[in-house]
Image: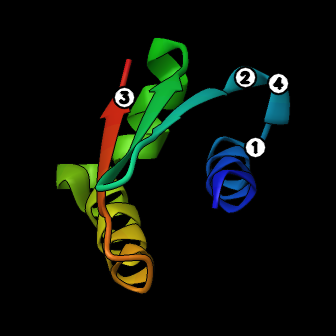
């Protein structure tokens, strides 16, 4: 799931090296931290937060298969 997550955010930003993704995986949850510059964060969040909300909803649906919760933080 980490590779898919990194791939989606690199497509959103347009540069694979501009985004750093960290992951913490436990028995009940998966936490993703996305580190990017201010300009890239604006692209990731999108207008009125629609882009990041869609990404969160997608990963929430995928995580149900594994019975885990997903948390996404943008730094």
Mark 2 touching mark 1, by CB under 8 A? yes
Element under label 1? loop
Relative placement, left or right, of 54 versus 48 is: right
| Residue occupying the point 66% across, 51% down | 2
Mark 3 surroundings within 10 Å by alpha-carbon count, few (fewer than 14), some (14 through 19), many (20 or more): few
Residue that badge 3 annotates: 74
x, y percentage for residue 1? 63, 62
The residue to which callout 4 is attached is: 17
SS at mark 2?
A: helix
Q: CA distance from mark 4 to mark 1?
A: 9 Å
Q: What residue do we see at 49% from left, 29% from top?
A: 34
Q: Who comes first in sequence, dot 3 or dot 4?
A: 4
**Vertical placement of 31 versus 57: above or below?**
above
The disc, 3 or 1, on the residue closer to the chain's N-terminal end is: 1
Task: Give the mark toward the camera: 2 or 1.
Answer: 2
Q: CA distance from mark 2 to mark 4?
A: 4 Å
Task: Establish if 19 lies above or below 29.
Answer: above
Give whichever of discs 3 and 2 has the lower sequence position.
2
């Amino acid at each position: 799931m980490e590779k898919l997550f990194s791939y989606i955010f690199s497509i959103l930003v347009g540069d694979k090296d501009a985004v750093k993704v960290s992951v913490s995986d436990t028995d009940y949850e998966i936490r993703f931290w996305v580190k990017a510059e201010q300009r890239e964060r604006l692209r990731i969040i999108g207008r009125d937060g629609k882009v990041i909300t869609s990404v969160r909803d997608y990963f929430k649906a995928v995580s149900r298969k594994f019975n885990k919760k997903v948390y996404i933080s943008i730094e």
